[in-house]
Amino acid sequence: MQPSQQQRFLQAIETFFTSNLHQGKQSTGENAKDLETEIINLFQEVATTVPAYQTFLKEQQIDPKTVKTLTDFQSLPLTTKDNYLKLHSLPNLCRYGRLETCDFVSVSSGTTGNPTFWPRFVSDEYQIARQFEQVFLDSFQADKKRTLAVVCFPLGTWVGGIYTANCCRHLATKGYPITTVTPGNNKPEIFKVVQDLGIYFEQVVLLGYPPFLKDVIDSGIAQGLDWSRYSIKLVMAGEVISEQWRTLVGERVKSTNFCYDSASLYGTADAGVLGNETPLSIGIRRFLAENPPIARHLFGQSRLPTLVQYDPSSRFFEVVDGTLLFSGNNGIPLIRYHINDQGGIISYEEMLTVLGGYGFDPIKTLNNGGESRGIHPLPFVYVFGRSHYTLSYYGANIYPENIAIGLEQPVIREWVTGKFVMDIGKDDNHNPFLLIIVELALNITESQDKQAEITNAIQSQLLRLNSEFANYVPSTSQRPTLILRPLGDPEYFPVGVKHRYTRQIS
């Protein structure tokens, strides 16, 4: 028996059940001293109990007793998969060198395809369940509405499906009228549970990867499923979506309030959910989508990142050279962990000040829409994603988001699923060209007219959104080469596999 496990569980469950969701949720500047104390305490606990981190500090010739302030903490070397996780056994990455301090192991394939094991204990889930609670409470009012949560993430050893199902069940134990069902990424099962069970609830929440959820919704419409009967809400993770995508999919399920009817989670297999979209962050992002120069001012790039709010007492973010670090308490505790996501941090106060300088008040906009939920003075973190998903073309960075918006234009969006693969090809003279392979929707056939119109739309959006593309790429090389493939094409769009937008084809 492990008495310490019982204590961890009891403490986590007591905190989860007794604390108000927004208790203590303040901007970073308002509780800086408390936050500093929490971070130093986490570091000292990890330095005392985790053998791998003890070895890491010893190799770096760091005495943990000298780390007393936030400045000391921020001078610590970064940990990564290569310099930390891969160099130590799984037990030594856990507290006291004992894998059995965790009760569950998930697997991630990672962006590079190499599997990694992530142990955790149930107490870690209660911490992450609070992120789900923020979405279900602030956005969906699930404290008042009978809610069916349909988990559409793949089930099995992967982190997404079972983790999500467990967090939804934790909300139910807290008293939320939420019932969870787990068809996974099986479309016929999803349709069945929505139609057979959805009629007993006031709303149905679909939780999954954005391209798959869109496929589910489009396939349902093709089969005559009337999504409007179920007051559909969406919880997404794993990919950056555009606001055009949110509008398009929202319209197809008859969404009435885009800021409150969906939310994306910023999560990783390494540490669960790190932050989540809020009605406030979505309202800001929708404004920025219509004003690319302001977005470039805020984020420094021509593409629109995922924009979420986060609780710094749960996950402490830092930025180094335009990439994100975080520290957090998990089954494998992580200190200054470099996740290789491009992005940055903007304080709540700075965000409102910058937007106010452009004449936009996001809080007033939400209130004028008759809503006031989801407004909390939490800092923002923005995430562009991993560099693995970016192509370089004549020195211009080409991002999946730029291509996606071209496929979400009127008429074109009826022809395609939204999935595509992009690559840099070479012609017979070894000159580069931008190659885009696009998946056609169900019962849509290829034609020269469709190919031309889709190509025009992609090129137009690249020129509008990506200043590097417009200025670096010669005009004679700006037109993409397009290939259209049928739904579920086994080479580029295999069914049941997490989609990748970049691939070395040539």
Image (cartoon, helix red, strand yellow):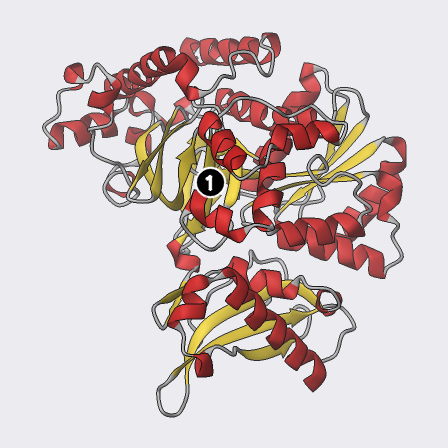
Above or below residue 152? Residue 410 is: below
Above or below residue 184? Residue 447 is: below
- Does the rendering let one see residue 415? yes
Above or below residue 417? Residue 172 is: above
372 or 310, which lies in front?
372
Image location of residue 495, percent across then percent down: 63, 62
167 or 99, which lies in front?
167
User: In which quadrant is the C terminus drawn?
Assistant: bottom left
Q: Residue at x 56, y 11 (%)?
A: 23
Image location of residue 292, percent across then percent down: 53, 52
Image location of residue 454, percent across then percent down: 64, 74
Please state if 399 lies on the left or on the right of 54 as rendered: right
Kind of residue sitting beneath label 1: Tyr
Element on which disc 1 rests: strand
Image location of residue 76, percent across then percent down: 20, 29
Q: Residue at x 42, y 71 (%)?
A: 504
Residue 489 placement: quadrant: bottom right
Q: Which residue is mark 1?
A: 382
Residue 204 placement: quadrant: top right
Check disc 1: other Cα within 10 Å, few if <14, some if 14-19, many if 20+: many
